[in-house]
Image (spheres, coloured by chain):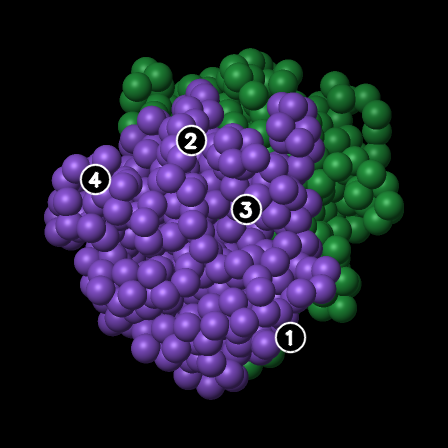
Chain colours: A purple, B green
Amino acid sequence: MGRSEFNVLCIGNAIVDVITRVDDEFITRHGLVRGSMRLIDERQAETLYAEMGQAVEVSGGSAANTAAGLASLGSRVAYFGKVKEDQLGAIFRHDMRSQGVVFDTPAAVTGPATARSFILVTGDGERTMNTYLGACVNFSMMDIDKAMVEAAEVTYMEGYLWDRPEAKDAFKLASQLSRAAGRKTALTLSDSFCVERHRDSFLELIRGGIDIVFANEAELKSLYQTTDFDAALKKISGDCSIAVITRSEKGCVVVAEGRLHESPAFPVSRVVDVTGAGDLFAAGFLHGFTAGRPLHECARIGSMAAAEVISHIGARPEVNLQSHAIQLGLL
Amino acid sequence: MGRSEFNVLCIGNAIVDVITRVDDEFITRHGLVRGSMRLIDERQAETLYAEMGQAVEVSGGSAANTAAGLASLGSRVAYFGKVKEDQLGAIFRHDMRSQGVVFDTPAAVTGPATARSFILVTGDGERTMNTYLGACVNFSMMDIDKAMVEAAEVTYMEGYLWDRPEAKDAFKLASQLSRAAGRKTALTLSDSFCVERHRDSFLELIRGGIDIVFANEAELKSLYQTTDFDAALKKISGDCSIAVITRSEKGCVVVAEGRLHESPAFPVSRVVDVTGAGDLFAAGFLHGFTAGRPLHECARIGSMAAAEVISHIGARPEVNLQSHAIQLGLL
């Protein structure tokens, strides 16, 4: 195993977020589940958009947000994901590259448009996501660049990829290539409904060889079908080397080699939009991890990055996270 | 003159803003003039975008922002402007209609893409705009719907339209139709460099029959080529019925029938992005004006709307301005 060209390679659905504020009544009227992500088709996307107020467009996508966060922290990062050759695709690519992320997956020239997630933010900062996968359905094993996977210290993948069979195959290929090259693999469970849809194959994958698993409390409980947090924690510690569990304002818990590390949440004066909290936590954690920091420091950098992103609209950092972390004495 | 179907019809360049934060050095290095708007071609747009960091996309355009503000205040509003039939064009149309603005100008099916303005926001909230007019160059007299002009109590136009001969002709046609129908016309001078480019024809137009002129201090001084504010004020009061001059933190001055009304600025805790301040001031003023409010109240509503829009990124209101104004005791 040679020196790694990239600290982290992120793989996920390439999505532009369409963010608007709504009242609770809008969520109820549309029968949505607050805080969750649901997949919608093109017709549903058009209907929902027509009923939404004025919006802001900003690049998103779970693993893409993590990639942007890592780059902002100073990591060397690559990204695989599929946009279409259209205006939103060009915006997505610009935003990745402008942060210094290497993103060369070819855009689709035919087929559905670049993916959009209609994100409804309520008064308390909670977000409810409605994702039209669009061009992401064209992401496949063909998009896994073997040399880049082998050159990355960690390959990080989002559970949302599991929602499409072609992306799932790409995901599996990437994790096999990474392990064969003596590198590490990481997975985020993404969403408790996503875990519901794919519980058995997630467990099989994790047990078959994912080194680091990121999850929030709800996702972890859903994975092991239990309401007992400690029992779930014990189970996941037997299934992977490092489990990183985020618990919103309660901070996070890292379990590694049977040892438990707890870390408090970072203070936030006002939560504006929680979109990207988990993604940026993973960015901070992985930045510390690939820099060889102890786990409690990795968690601290993750909490800092999450705190920045929930203090404003959008799931990408608004400040340079490296400078921010240095100011805070974290780097 | 019958009852008006619309309080205000706004006509302007239909633009999507691409907003990013930069440091002062970026402005200097690109030889830009802080606080101004410059026109750029497609090649310059590509070069600048490649050098810009991660951005946020949000519908903009001076008169379009005014239309959105008026609708948010509860006015009945229509808009004429030209987008292309592309993703950014669809976003622009959605954002207008979702505020309740009637916007039916057909999109161009061929030719350049929907216009973009690359807005560079520095630490102090000042913005420097670089506008690629794109599809706006296809806006012409053909897009002036006579019946709608006749149905609008006030037709409000942005000076930026003057930068293209076809748009200038459309502008003149609209003002003639409005006056012939016994309605009122309003013009914003838009930008001091825009005034430099079109001083003589602006003066000719105003003297030929614009009822309400909006300008900031720099634009007013440029119009009359003087550094003496009071002298310029005296001159404009002879050239139009109502002149509304904004002076940033110094508030505004309204001159009507020889009488001068001064109004203080509205308090703002932190200026984040001044983009849209003038546009939203005009929205508030015209809302009050078409509701028959006295001029000092019109100015007060304008100041309130401007204060809201400079407290966040983007040139469209983030809250419902009608509710906001009611809470503040202004409506």
Residue indicated by mark 2: A261
Mark 4 vs mark 3: give the one in front: 4
Q: Earlier in the sequence, mark 1 or mark 3?
A: 1
Residue labelled with disc 3: A286
Three-letter amino acid code at the position of disc 4:
Ala
Identify the residue under disc 4: A231
**Label 1 – label 4 distance at C-alpha:** 40 Å
Mark 4, secondary structure of its residue = helix
User: Foreground mark, 2 or 1?
Assistant: 2
Q: Chain of mark 4?
A: A
Q: Amino acid at mark 2?
A: His
Is residue B219 positioned above or below A175 on the image?
Answer: above
Q: Nearer the viewer, residue A198 or B282?
A: A198
Q: Indicate the position of residue B226 as horizontal and vertical percent values.
A: 84, 29
Q: Residue at x 30, y 31 (%)?
A: A124
In front of the other: B9 or B2: B9
